[in-house]
Image (tube, rainbow, N blue to C red):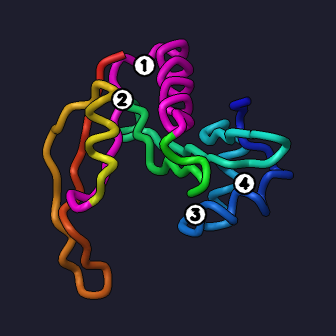
Amino acid sequence: MIRYVEINDKKEWYDLDRHLPENVFDEKVRIKRGYVLVEDEKIIGILRYNLFWDNTPFCTMLFIEDSYRSKGYGRQMMEHWEQDMKAQGYGMLMTSTQVDEDAQHFYRKLGYKDAGGFIVDVPGFEQPMEMIMIKAV
């Protein structure tokens, strides 16, 4: 079952997502910009998003617990999000991944295409190039 994240999901959410500040979690709950995937009454996956340019949904985190990967759950989460965004009237979606991560292949299978990227070389924040991907819905 996929549903919007709720305030009582906080502990389980943070078992999977260690990057989201706690005050932002509360906002995600309030404005319904996060989803949880529940299997056997346990949260095994999360998806959160923001609005890029304040008008384009941008998936900022998709995470499926290790033991549940490669079973179609990531696809289910993305398709659920895509359908929800389309129902809300959005026509284009965005996501990103580092170029050294395998997620780019997953997103391409879902119809996302490469749309550029950027390099973060600020001391203390360095990372491989971040690849931006887009899809029409």
> Neighbour class for label 1 at 10 Å: few (<14), some, many (≥20)?
some
For label 1, the residue is 90
State which region is magenta.
71-100
Q: Residue drawn 37% across and 41% down?
A: 52
Q: Nearer the viewer, mark 2 or mark 4?
A: 2
User: Element at badge 4?
Assistant: helix
The amino acid on which the numbered mark 4 sits, given as a three-letter code, is Asp
Q: Position of residue 16 (x, y in %)?
A: 63, 61
The amino acid on which the numbered mark 3 sits, given as a three-letter code, is Leu
Q: Residue drawn 55% across and 29% down?
A: 76
User: Element at badge 1?
Assistant: loop
Nearer the N terminus, badge 3 or badge 2?
A: 3
For label 2, the residue is 93
> Neighbour class for label 4 at 10 Å: few (<14), some, many (≥20)?
some
* 65, 127: nearer the viewer: 65
Q: Position of residue 35 (x, y in %)?
A: 65, 39
Task: Quarter of the image for the N terminus: give it.
Answer: top right
For label 4, the residue is 26
Query: Is the C-beta separation of discs 1 and 2 under 8 Å?
Result: yes
Nearer the N terminus, badge 1 or badge 4?
A: 4
